[in-house]
Amino acid sequence: MADTALSESVVGTPDVWRLRARGCWAEAAALLAPFCDDDAGAALSRAELLVEGCFYHVAGWAEAEDALRKAEALASTDEERGAAASERGYLAYGATLFSVRDRADEARSAFGRSAALLSPASPGRPLLDFRRGLVAENLAANAVAARAAYRRAHAGAVAHGDTFLTSFTWRHLAGLAAAEGDMAEARHGFAESLRIRVALGHLVGTAPALLALADVAGEEEAGRLRGEAARLYALLNGIPTWLAPAMAP
């Protein structure tokens, strides 16, 4: 459930993408640091990276908070302010999800502010819809609202050509299908999510995708998928940390 998506603006930066795809968020953020004093886009991208690292390490919250404050201070357009508000909501959601501190009200407020600032056609809108779906699913336990948000996010990601985000919308729609007993739909969604991550070289997100598919696969295939996940998890030195219980012998 902690699986997470980052904006296409960061994904589109080759050197940054290669580092974050291997779980090297601090190193990726360091590449952007020289540009963050007066470039709102670079500052927000750096904050996004550090926030995402929190979701995989379940640590680094203070540094991410500091980077986000700097990004918020530099934001000068509705698009920039809306994107920063989305990131603010996401950081608050993560702190709540991992029981660092209950910031659920802050998350909802920030996402509402982001929705007011981002136009319906904004490329940041699908990511916002996805994140609001996470709140509905994991904080409010409202599967109906979560599915609607994920579907809006999926359609928007496809329309904007954000292939990476679709790996997350596929995964979370599949998770809801599995919870309702629709194993065929779940297998399809999890398989699509895994296919995209492998194609993009997103190593740090591949082990969770392998395990998700294993949970709805037949016994023989499930064993193979879990073995691949365990090897990749070891290669990445135990990242994401929240996979540790699933990786235990």
Image (cartoon, rainbow, N blue to C red):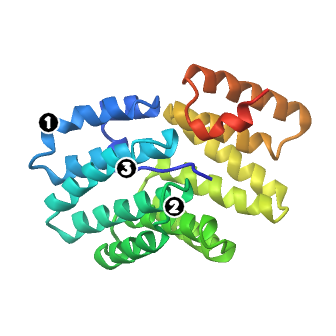
Quick check: can you spot residue 159? no
Residue at mark 2 to residue at mark 1: CA–CA distance? 31 Å
Q: Which residue is pictured at 31% across the width and 75% down the height?
A: 119
Residue 82 location, x and y as percent?
Answer: 29, 68
Question: Badge 1, how many Cα within 10 Å: few under 14, some, many 20+?
Answer: few
Q: Residue furthest left?
A: 38
Residue beneath label 3, please?
Answer: 8
In the rendered structure, which amino acid carries the disc numbered 3? Glu
Figure check: 76 above or below 170: below
Q: Quadrant of residue 196?
A: top right
Disc 3 or 2, which lies upstream in sequence? 3
Q: Which residue is pictured at 69% across the width and 52% down the height?
A: 189
In the rendered structure, which amino acid carries the disc numbered 1? Pro
Residue 59 location, x and y as percent?
Answer: 45, 42
Residue beneath label 2, please?
Answer: 96
Residue 80 location, x and y as percent?
Answer: 23, 63
Residue at mark 1 to residue at mark 3: CA–CA distance? 21 Å
Quadrant of the frame with the C terminus: top right
Is 106 on the left-hand or right-hand side of 198?
left
Q: Which residue is pictured at 17% across the width and 54% down the height?
A: 40
13 vs 65, nearest the viewer: 65
Residue beneath label 1, please?
Answer: 34
Badge 2 marks a residue whose secondary structure is helix
Badge 3 marks a residue whose secondary structure is helix
